[in-house]
Image (spheres, grey):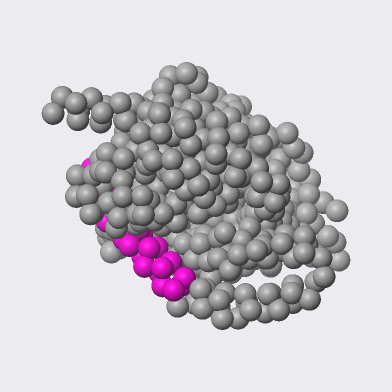
């Protein structure tokens, strides 16, 4: 079985081409010894079976980051290289093409975005280009599924190029190739190109970013809440829960029944695998996950995300990050689980950790934010703004300090290629959403089940009640909060918004409400976030992050209590 490697610059359509060639038979796997994720697939052609790997995008064979090293290693080890080229930006793409030819591996050049060349006034003579490169050249449109069969046939007939180019002659060679194989014609900008220009304008880019972020939050909130209220909660309480309870009630062992459905009618207090586990994954997290990735898929296919990354790059660079960190941070405004999963696309471990800490500390998840606003308004707008202001300020300060501690030596320079703005295909959006939903339920649901089982066991062993009694005195002394808040803090691990709601019976003052909310937001992750991050970074790193943030939270909330106390004394 031959190993086929898709190699090309970022944003040249490799992932979509991979789906076309494999029939969307995707398996994800980490490259050995790293956290870099690859897509693996198989296809048959001409009676032979091929393994195809969609590696990270890269601009040259010079090593800049961990992902670049992986992509280069894949290209060197592959039996056949399919160099995916952006037909609308041939000059930039040819730099990598010539470097790949020098590896002396059987190779095919795939000219993707062939449908866009007409609109951009670009004419490429593929036969002339094939003669100059001495490897098969196949124009395709992965978007419209055109000439994919011809590409598969060319892979079977891939050959090693005899073209020899000295490194210092690279760009002179590119100029000669362009002069013979490409003709450019004058054309006027399309409406989508004018929109693209506006999104990159210093002022227009910021306005567009604000509009997109607010629209995304609005859509995700109301779509998620609507799905919960009118679809998922009725399904759970009217159909699923009665059915599960009737089945489990026939089990004679009380211990097993307790592990499966718990001993409470409230699915968030039962700690049952089939009640709390399903309720958290299906009712609490999934509607927001679905809503966000629906919007995210549209922005992704439209071509906006690289533009957003560039607009926000200057701000994030001050935090030791790149503009692409804005994408998982934006996800975190809805739910931390998809945000942590999206952080896997970042270039190195340092960026992932800094971004995850920023996600974790900056803003509560959507459901908790809504609860803080709805309950906090009874104390006034200033109280609500103070809570979010403290969270954002603490996140920026911590990221700044960690950035100084880490240093900037391993931060690669940020550069990206803008794909053309396109009207997304509904069918392709639906297909990508389906793949993400499958990944969600295959990765997150089992982890939540394990976490709920652990909570159930701790509850049965009376460890939770012991912890509750243990923390009552420190809570009163350090944070100035009533001892009755201790059980709420433990519930915070299971349901973040419910823990905020349970502050109402405690009749807290405005300063106490601020301290309590900041503590509940930062102190512990929800079970889904903890288990998701454990999978992404490993148990040791995840516990270090949460342990460090917990200590910062104790110090921050104790400091807030001290400041509020001094302010009250002085006045």
Q: Position of residue 157 (x, y in %)?
A: 77, 56
The secondary structure making up most of the magenta span is helix
Where is the C terminus found, in terms of image quarters?
top left
State which region is magenta: 202-229
Above or below, comparing residue 421 to residue 203 in the picture:
below
Identified at 30% across, 26% down, the residue is 562
Identified at 66% across, 46% down, the residue is 462
Task: Decide which of 540, 161 is in the foreground and name it.
Answer: 540
Task: Decide which of 453, 480 is in the foreground and name it.
Answer: 480
Above or below, comparing residue 228 to residue 479 in the picture:
below
**Magenta-span inclusion, residue 226:** yes
Identified at 70% across, 51% down, the residue is 460
Q: Position of residue 459 (x, y in %)?
A: 65, 50
Q: Is residue 45 left or right of residue 483?
A: right
Using the rendered image of the protein, determine whether residue 404 is visible from the camera's viewpoint. Answer: yes
- Snapshot quadrant of residue 106: top right
Q: Position of residue 44 (x, y in %)?
A: 80, 64
**Magenta-span inclusion, residue 77:** no
Q: Position of residue 12 (x, y in %)?
A: 52, 51
Above or below, comparing residue 426 to residue 262 in the picture:
below
């Amino acid at each position: 079985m031959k190993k086929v490697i898709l190699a090309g610059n970022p944003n040249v359509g490799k992932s979509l081409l991979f789906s076309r060639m494999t029939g969307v038979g995707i398996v994800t796997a980490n490259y050995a010894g790293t956290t870099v994720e690859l897509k693996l697939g198989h296809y048959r052609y001409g009676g032979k079976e091929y393994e195809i790997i969609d590696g990270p995008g890269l601009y040259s064979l010079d090593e800049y980051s961990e992902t670049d090293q992986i992509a280069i290693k894949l290209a060197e080890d592959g039996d056949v290289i399919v160099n995916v080229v952006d037909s609308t930006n041939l000059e930039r793409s040819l730099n990598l093409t010539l470097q790949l030819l020098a590896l002396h591996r059987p190779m095919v050049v795939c000219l993707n975005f062939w449908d866009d060349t007409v609109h951009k006034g670009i004419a490429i003579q593929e036969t002339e280009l094939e003669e100059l490169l001495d490897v098969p050249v196949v124009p395709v449109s992965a978007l419209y599924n055109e000439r994919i069969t011809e590409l598969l046939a060319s892979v079977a007939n891939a050959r090693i190029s005899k073209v020899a180019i000295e490194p210092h002659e690279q760009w002179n060679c590119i100029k000669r190739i362009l002069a013979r194989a490409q003709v450019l014609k004058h054309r006027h900008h399309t409406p989508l190109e004018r929109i693209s220009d506006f999104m990159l304008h210093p002022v227009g880019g910021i306005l567009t970013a604000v509009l997109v972020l607010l629209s995304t939050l609005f859509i995700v909130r109301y779509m998620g809440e609507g799905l919960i209220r009118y679809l998922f909660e009725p399904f759970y309480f009217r159909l699923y829960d009665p059915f599960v309870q009737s089945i489990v009630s026939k089990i004679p062992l009380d211990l097993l029944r307790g592990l499966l459905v718990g001993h409470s009618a409230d699915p968030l207090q039962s700690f049952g695998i089939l009640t709390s586990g399903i309720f958290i994954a299906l009712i609490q997290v999934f509607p927001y996950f679905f809503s966000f990735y629906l919007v995210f898929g549209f922005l992704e296919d439209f071509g906006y995300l690289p533009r957003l990354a560039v607009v926000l790059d200057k701000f994030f660079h001050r935090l030791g990050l790149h503009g692409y960190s804005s994408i998982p941070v934006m996800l975190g405004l809805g739910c931390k689980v998809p945000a942590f999963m999206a952080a896997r696309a970042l270039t190195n471990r340092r960026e992932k950790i800094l971004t995850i800490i920023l996600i974790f500390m900056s803003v509560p998840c959507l459901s908790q934010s809504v609860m803080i606003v709805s309950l906090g308004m009874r104390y006034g707008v200033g109280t609500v703004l103070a809570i979010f202001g403290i969270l954002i300020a603490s996140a920026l300060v911590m990221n700044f300090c960690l950035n100084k501690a880490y240093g900037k030596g391993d931060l690669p320079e940020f550069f990206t290629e803008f794909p053309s703005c396109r009207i997304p295909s509904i069918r392709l959006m639906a297909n990508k959403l389906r793949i993400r939903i499958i990944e969600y339920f295959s990765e997150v649901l089992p982890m939540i089940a394990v976490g709920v089982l652990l909570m159930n066991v701790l509850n049965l062993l009376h460890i939770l009640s012991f912890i509750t009694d243990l923390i009552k005195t420190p809570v009163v002394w350090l944070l100035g909060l009533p001892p009755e808040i201790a059980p709420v803090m433990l519930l915070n691990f299971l349901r973040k918004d419910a823990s905020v709601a349970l502050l109402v019976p405690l009749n807290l003052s405005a300063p106490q409400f601020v301290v309590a909310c900041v503590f509940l937001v930062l102190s512990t992750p929800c079970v889904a976030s903890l288990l998701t991050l454990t999978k992404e970074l490993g148990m040791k790193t995840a516990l270090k992050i949460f342990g460090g943030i917990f200590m910062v939270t104790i110090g921050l909330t104790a400091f807030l209590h001290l400041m509020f106390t001094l302010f009250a004394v002085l006045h």
